[in-house]
Every structure is written in structure tokens, then in C-alpha cells.
């Protein structure tokens, strides 16, 4: 369970921006608690290879993207008819897939960069990143694209 009141780097220690990544993860946990009353829980990426492959398949199929960083943690859950899958990477990158289960709903991939990390080479020339401030995560840079296929 991700605690957004006492931010912990547990599971993210190998990241060079572990504290910022932990803040980013806590920021997501706070969002889901406040908006959906959902408890945001994560597990090691090695324990959920299907979730990692799901995200990587969408990136590959939709945009011919491959992420070079090692996945550290993942979560996958459904709230209010939307399936969410998150992967937190060692580089400080967070990728989420928002996929409305019902046809015609929103479906997108979001990228968030932890404070202090460089834009990953595989994303640098392909996406523009907007900035937002967060008490938990400092400055978050984010971007997204709409999913066109069925997953």
C-alpha cells in the first residue's frame, strides 16, 4: 500500500531519483484515494510480468516504442469502469495506461517524469512534456497519447 502521508522509497531504492520517484508514486496514490476512495497498492515488477508486458505491448504496437529502463514496480486495477495499469521505472519514469472497459470511452497512455531526471532518449524527440507542481513530487513533467487499438 502506498502511503502518501509518509513517503517511502521502498521498492525504488535502485533509482538515481528514488525520492522524487517515491513522491510521484505517492502523488498518484493521493489522487486515487481522493477521487475514487481507492487504495493504491504496488508490487515488484518481477511479480507481475503480465502487467509490464501489457504496457510494453501497447507502447510497441501504438508508437513503436521500447523503454530502456528497468521496471521496478507495477499496479493494475479497475475503478468506475476504467482499467488502470502503472509501471514505475528505475530511471524515474512512470507510465500509466488508462483504458475504459466500455467501447467509446477514454483510452490513453500517460508518461510522467520524476523531478531531476532527464527525458528518456526514446521519448525525447517524440513527445512534448508539460510541467505541473506537486507537494509530494516537486515538478512533474507529463505527456500522453491516445490509444487507437483494442487491448
Image (cartoon, rainbow, N blue to C red):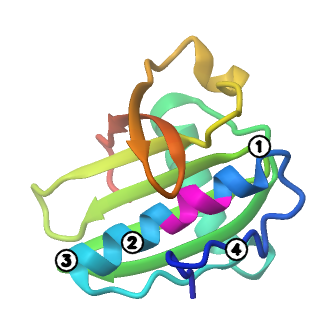
- In the picture, the disc for residue 91 is 1
Q: Residues within 10 Å of mark 4 (few under 14, many from 20)?
A: some
Tag 2's secondary structure? helix
Q: CA distance from mark 3 to mark 4?
A: 30 Å
Q: CA distance from mark 2 to mark 4?
A: 14 Å
Q: Is residue 23 part of the magenta span, yes or no?
A: yes
The residue labelled by disc 2 is 30
Identify the residue shown where x is 21% and y is 73%: 35
Image coords of residue 93 (percent x, y): 64, 44
- In the picture, the disc for residue 122 is none
Tag 4's secondary structure? loop
Please give the count of numbered marks on the rendered protein: 4
- Asked if residue 37 lies left or right of residue 46, the reply is left
Q: What is the quadrant of residue 114 in the picture? A: top right
Q: Which residues are magenta?
A: 22-26
The residue labelled by disc 4 is 8
Tag 3's secondary structure? loop
Q: In the image, which is nearer the foreground, mark 1 or mark 3?
A: 1
Identify the residue shown where x is 52% and y is 63%: 86
Q: Camera-side residue: 47 or 143?
A: 143
Q: What is the quadrant of residue 97 in the picture? A: bottom left
The residue labelled by disc 3 is 81
Amino acid at each position: 500500500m502506498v502511503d502518501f502521508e509518509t513517503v517511502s522509497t521502498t521498492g525504488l531504492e535502485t533509482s538515481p531519483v528514488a525520492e522524487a520517484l517515491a513522491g510521484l508514486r505517492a502523488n498518484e496514490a493521493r489522487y486515487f484515494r481522493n477521487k475514487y476512495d481507492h487504495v493504491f497498492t504496488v508490487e515488484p515488477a518481477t511479480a507481475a510480468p503480465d502487467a509490464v508486458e501489457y504496457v510494453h505491448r501497447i507502447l510497441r504496437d501504438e508508437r513503436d516504442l521500447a523503454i530502456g529502463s528497468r521496471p521496478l514496480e507495477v499496479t493494475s486495477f479497475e475503478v468506475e469502469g476504467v482499467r488502470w495499469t502503472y509501471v514505475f521505472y528505475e530511471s524515474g519514469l512512470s507510465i500509466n495506461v488508462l483504458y475504459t472497459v466500455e467501447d467509446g470511452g477514454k483510452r490513453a497512455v500517460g508518461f510522467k517524469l520524476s523531478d531531476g531526471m532527464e527525458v528518456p532518449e526514446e521519448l525525447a524527440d517524440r513527445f512534448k512534456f508539460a510541467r505541473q507542481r506537486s507537494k509530494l513530487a516537486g515538478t512533474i513533467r507529463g505527456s500522453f497519447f491516445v490509444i487507437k487499438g483494442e487491448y
